[in-house]
Amino acid sequence: MQTETRSLSDKVWLVLKGLAMGAANKVPGVSGGVVAYVAGFYEEFIYSLQKVNGKALKLLFSGRFNSFWRYINGKFLGLLILGMLISYFSVSLLLDIAIRNYPLLVWSAFFGMIIGSIYYIAKDFEEWTRRNIVMLISGIIFGVAISLMEPAQENDNLIFVFICGIIGVSGMTLPGLSGSFILILLGNYVLLLVDAVNALFVTMTSVFGGDFSFIDDPEHMRLLTVLIVFSLGSLTGLVTLSHFLSYLLKKFRWATNAAILGFIIGSLGVVWPWKLEVFKRNEIGEIAIDRNGSPILDNYDRYMPTDINMENVLAVFFILTGIFMVVALGKYGTRTRARG
């Protein structure tokens, strides 16, 4: 794990990496962990999270803040998390708009990025043993199975929301497993990553404007409560999953990497660019809508393109661009690790 003094450029890059992780993790089918893996800081991320343990809490509650910060690699985690937080109110919102207006091009870019990730991870894989091949195939099967599952109904029970936080943060720690897509399957993507986040944004702007009327709005306070519980679940998931993955990386490095590669391959179906949205319908056959009046996504109807037109040509261009971006990011990550 890197603990050296970081230059200003390194700090800026870490914030940008956090931006990329946060944006990727919010898009259904894309994993923020892939960004960490390809950019070369996945293991440092996992091992730093692993340091949030009993010893860290003892240092914190005893007032030894500097020791606590150094122990958990705070400069690294702090800058990454700062980037993720900024992402949820900037890059992620822009991605939401882009997906609504240019879905084929956005999904094409992400599809290319995942193909690039598969190439980057597979090219240096050193141990194609029978066990690791089994792990690879198992990862693929698991990833495909998740993509074929039917989404559940929205559920704002706080215990379930806490569990959603634990599971939904998986995309940050486990490359190839999309936390946002998992939340869609659990039925709570709109509630947790759209409605609750928007409520927090409104709260922050209201507080800065000296307006506290939102306190008297039961629906607004419900969403804030949901967001707090979801955040606690996410923090719990980050810490617990990081301990588990840290153990796997130390004891079964190549088998773990094979499973991760399988997850990423299996996720290709989720981000296949050529697809049509299929919305939920109510008892009388009408498209179901959420509390904001937006149609509720059920799944996707995927198809193969047959026409050679400008839209499909642009889609292929964006796939190639996505591949190039990941390969370039991977080369940067390699230089970073060599320097460290």
Image: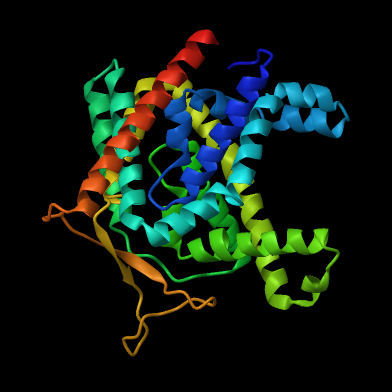
Residue at 55%, 23% in the rendered image: 44
As drawn, is 186 to the left or to the right of 81? left
- Kindly identify the residue that appears in the image at 53 percent across and 46 percent down: 169
Residue 182 in view of the camera: no
The residue depicted at 23 percent of the width and 43 percent of the height is 316
Residue 276 placed where, x, y %?
27, 64
The spot of residue 129 in percent (x, y) is 23, 20
Image colouring: rainbow
Image quarter for residue 140? top left
How many numbered discs? 0
Residue at 74% across, 77% down: 217
User: Which percent across, then down, holds residue 304?
Assistant: 15, 54
Which one is nearer the viewer's eye here, 25 or 314?
A: 314
Pick the front one: 323 or 117: 323
User: 161 or 1: nearer the eye?
Assistant: 1
284 relative to 186, above or below: below
Q: Quadrant of the C terminus?
A: top right
Q: Position of residue 41 (x, y in %)?
A: 51, 24
Q: Quadrant of the N terminus?
A: top right
From this view, report whether residue 295 is shown above or below residue 83.
below
Q: Quadrant of residue 227?
A: bottom right
Q: Residue furthest front?
A: 310
